[in-house]
Amino acid sequence: MEPLVVGVDFGTLSGRAVVVRVRDGAELGSAVYDYRHGVLDRTMPDGRPLPPDWALQVPSDYIEVLRTAVPGAIRQAGVDPSQVIGVGTDFTACTMVPVTEDGTPLCELPEFECEPHAYVKLWKHHAAQPQADRINALARARSEKWLPRYGGLISSEWEFAKALELLEEAPQVYREMRHFVEAADWIVWQLTGTYVRNACTAGYKGIYQDGEYPSRDFLAELNPAFADFVVDKLAHPLGTLGDRAGRLSAQAAVWTGLREGISVAVGNVDAHVTAPAANAVQPGQMVAIMGTSTCHVMNGTELREVPGMCGVVDGGIVAGLWGYEAGQSGVGDIFAWFVDNCVPYRGNDVHEQLTELARDQRPGEHGLIALDWHNGNRSVLVDHDLSGVIVGQTLATKPEDMYRALLEATAFGTRTIIDTFIDAGVPVRELVIAGGLVKNDLLMQIYADVTNLPLSIIGSAQGPALGSAIHAAVAAGAYPDIRAAAAAMGSVARDVYLPIEANVEVYQEMYEEYLTLHDYFGRGVNDVMHRLRARRNVQKGRK
């Protein structure tokens, strides 16, 4: 019997498991479990309202993925579970779980079941922006050497901002918390019974650089009660990507239907595992994983300081190269918001209707320019208090016009990231697209035209899950390293979309207009977006 591996991708709204043949990466079966509680961004499970910019999840939903999706994928594949030699997982990041000494989420304790801060804080929880602002101001004032590794700004999405928010808004929860754990590591803990902190999130989301976290003095200056956060609640032995974190426990074997004792890979981030799945691990290949948001990852041979990047980590994607990350906080979420709130059309797939109507337009025909900041800006401004804009609307503007303008705005956002990398000395020669949005061919052509780059498309519809399976194969000893496994198991179709010269010229003009708005609203010329959000927060608080 041929050896198999299972990859499990924990996304924003669901978890997906895929059964993969080790020899060639063939995907034999898959299954999806939609989180029962979804994203808690308006109310708690008991119906109590949440403040603005919150995004929580319920950790038991992740266990249901193991109970449901993994056995479902095995059934669909029609294989013997004894053929599976390893499991790999990936997660959204930075998604944080406050837990006890044994890994129990605090929200599962009776005394904290009604406390929002005891729940999982999802990557798009942006309520810690004030704490992030203080971290950045102090780091600049002290000339902290790690700040340039993050493009000069630490995000409110990341570990330290969320932890400081927890300390200052729910000190009783902070005191009870023994570990502040990335969900990527918590799920591996549940599979193996062993807590191993993965090097990827430690570097990109945990400000771990050159073997060190931010100093105790720095943390104490932020808040004296925060001084020992690293030692008391964060630091833990690190696991290298592709290594074995442990073996499948008896409990996890019952959940999944797999053999007890098989290898479980060190946890990883959904975006970073996708680069090997697309066999795109060479310098100059940028992978954009496009879903609710977009994460851009790529490797480079040299360390460069890229303004507004999410981070650069030695070996953050594959060993021996610098792994770079950037991203956009809203992409598919923006399209979904527009369809759900601004469109009179109804039917089975409004996105397809709008796409077909927008397809008939020439670039610029709608007379609109939009800013893709409806969920803030991750790169290159790193400001989650920014908001979306559409300029140029008239009484003749139609829904398909605005829809196309939003598609284009996300492409302009990616172009801004690419140009920033190139200007910093990190060349981008190819754009490889993965994620659910690859099925929109109009969007893909717009991206090729706006970036003036050839677009390659990952060969898998479930890239993160395949990437996790690749890491599982390495952890189980089937391949010597990630590069070798990616070459055998990864899949990509090269140059599927090529720039159309006439469109490139028009989009260059429109991109210059986008940059004017980008800098006007995003770089302090007019802080109206911050004032509007502050006023909103005050009024909602009074209400």
Image (cartoon, rainbow, N blue to C red):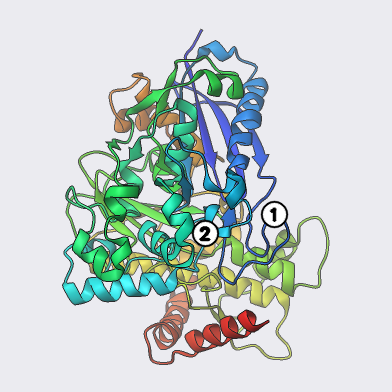
Where does residue 159 sit, x and y in percent of width and height? 38, 56
Q: Position of residue 366 (x, y in %)?
A: 63, 81
Looking at the image, can residue 285 be seen?
Answer: no
- Residue 316 appears left or right of 466: left
Which residue is label 2 attached to? 293
Q: Nearer the viewer, mark 1 or mark 2?
A: 1
Bin the neighbour count of mark 2 within 10 Å (Cα to Cα): few under 14, some 14-19, many 20 and up. many
Please tell me which residue lies in front, 350 or 239: 239
Residue 86: give x, y in percent of width and height: 45, 21
Query: Looking at this view, is 515 or 10 the one in front?
Result: 10
SS for dot 1: loop
Q: Residue at x 73, y 80 (%)?
A: 398
Residue name at image x 46 percent, y 39 percent: 186
Q: Which residue is mark 1?
A: 45
- The disc labelled 2 sits on which kind of residue? Ser
Contact between marks 1 and 2 (CB within 8 A): the answer is: no
Whether residue 249 is visible, yes or no, is yes
What's the amino acid at mark 1? Pro
Q: Earlier in the sequence, mark 1 or mark 2?
A: 1
Q: What is the total number of numbered labels drawn onto the structure image?
A: 2
Pick the quarter of the image with the C terminus.
bottom right
